[in-house]
Amino acid sequence: MVTASLVALGALGTVGMNWYLLRQLRTYDPVTMEMPYTSAPLIPEFALDGRRTPSDFGVETWREVSTPSFIDRSLQLRGWLLPATGGPSSEAIVFVHGRWSNRLKPMGYLELMQTLGLDETHHLLFPDLRNSGASDEAETGMGYHFAEDLTAWLLHLHETVGVERVTIYAFSMGAMATAVMGARPELKAALDEQGLQVERVVMDSPLSNVQGNVEMNAARQGFPTWLVAMGLHSFSRTVDSALPSLRLSQLRPATTWPWLILQGTADVTTPHVLLQREVAAMDPAHVRLRTFPDGQHVKMYRASAHRAAYTAEVAAFLGSPKLITAPDSLTVP
C-alpha cells in the first residue's frame, strides 16, 4: 500500500512538472502597456523614459489600429500605425516584438528609421501580437501562433492602406514567428493571394532553435533531461508536431526572403552558439550574419560601442536613402 502510494505521488509529481514545462512553452504572463513603467526589471529593459505614445517620440501623425488574428478571429490584436511622412506609399516596415514584450519596446528603433530616412518612404507598424500589450491573451507557442498574428497584420496593411511590399524587423521570438510565417503553407498562401511581397527581413537576436534553446535553459535550471524531453514532446503536439522544424535552418528554405541577422556574442537569452549552428546549415546566398563582440540580447543598437556599426548594417541591407557608413572594424563577420 505504501509503495503504491509513493508511485502514485511520483506519477502526480511528474504530471505536474510536465504541465508546468508545457505551460512555460505555450505561453507566458503578458506584459501590459503599463508594466514597462511600473515593473522594476522592465523599466531598464524598455528604456522608455516615460514616453507612452508615438507623440512622445516626436511623431505628429499616427493612429491606433486593430485586427483579428488570422486563424482565430476571436482574438483581437492592437497596435500603432505611423503613416509614411513623405506621402502615399505601398511599402511598410513591421516591427515584431518578442516574448515578454509588446509594441513599446521596438519603438526605440523609430529613431533608427528616422536616421535612415525610411520613415519618409515606408509606413511603420508597431503591433502587439497575442498575449502582449493591449492585444488579447492567448497561447503563443514559442512563435508558432505569433506567425498567425503577423500574417493578419500584413493583410490588414494591404486592405487598409494598400501596402504591397513589406520589410519585417523582428526581435527574438518574433524572428522565429517571421520564419514560421514563411514556412507555414496556409499563411504564405494568404499573403500570395493578395500579392503581398516580403522584401527583406531583419532579425535582431533571433530565437534560432526552439528545442535547443529550451534544452539549454532547462539544463541551466537543473531540470532532468527526461522531463524536458517529455515536456517538449507534449508541446510539439500543440503546434501541429512542428517542433523539429522550429529552427531557422529548417524554416529558411521555404522562402527566398533576404535575411539580415544581428547577434551579440554575450546573448544568454538566445545563445550565440545555437545561432552559429543554424547559420552554418543555411545556404549563405540569402542570409547575412553580423555579430557584435559582447553584444547582449536586443541591446546592440542601444550600446554606444555598436550603434554606428549596427546602423550601417541596417542601412546597407534596407537600402537607406541616406548614406550611412561605419568602420569595418566595428563588426565581426
Image (spheres, rainbow, N blue to C red):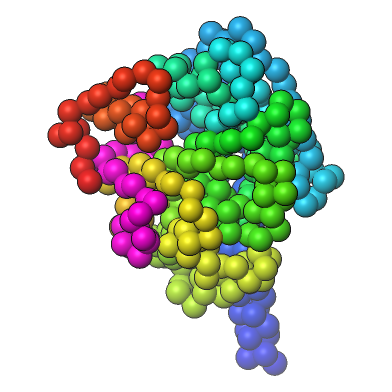
Please check the rendered image and state whether residue 284 is part of the magenta-colored stretch, yes or no.
yes
**Is 156 displayed left or right of 27 in the figure?**
right
Which image quarter: residue 217? Answer: bottom left
The quarter in which the N terminus is drawn is bottom right
**Horizontal and vertical percent position of residue 302:** 35, 26
Which image quarter: residue 174? Answer: top right
**Horizontal and vertical percent position of residue 18:** 61, 69
The span shown in magenta is: 276-303
- What residue appears at the point 61 percent right and 79 percent down from the top-left corner? 10
Q: Residue 120, relative to residue 204: is it above or below?
A: above
Which image quarter: residue 196? Answer: top right
**Is 239 displayed left or right of 171 in the figure?**
right
- What residue appears at the point 72 percent right and 43 percent down from the top-left corner? 194
- What residue appears at the point 66 percent right and 31 percent down from the top-left corner? 163
Q: Residue 191, relative to residue 104: is it above or below?
A: below
**Horizontal and vertical percent position of residue 95:** 55, 33
- Comparing 112 with 12, the one in front is 112
- Comparing 228 with 332, the one in front is 332
Can residue 161 be seen by looking at this rendering?
A: yes
Can residue 131 be seen by looking at this rendering?
A: no
- Comparing 10 with 32, the one in front is 32
**Horizontal and vertical percent position of residue 26:** 64, 57
**Is 136 displayed left or right of 36 in the figure?**
right
Count how many numbered circles sit on residues in the image.
0
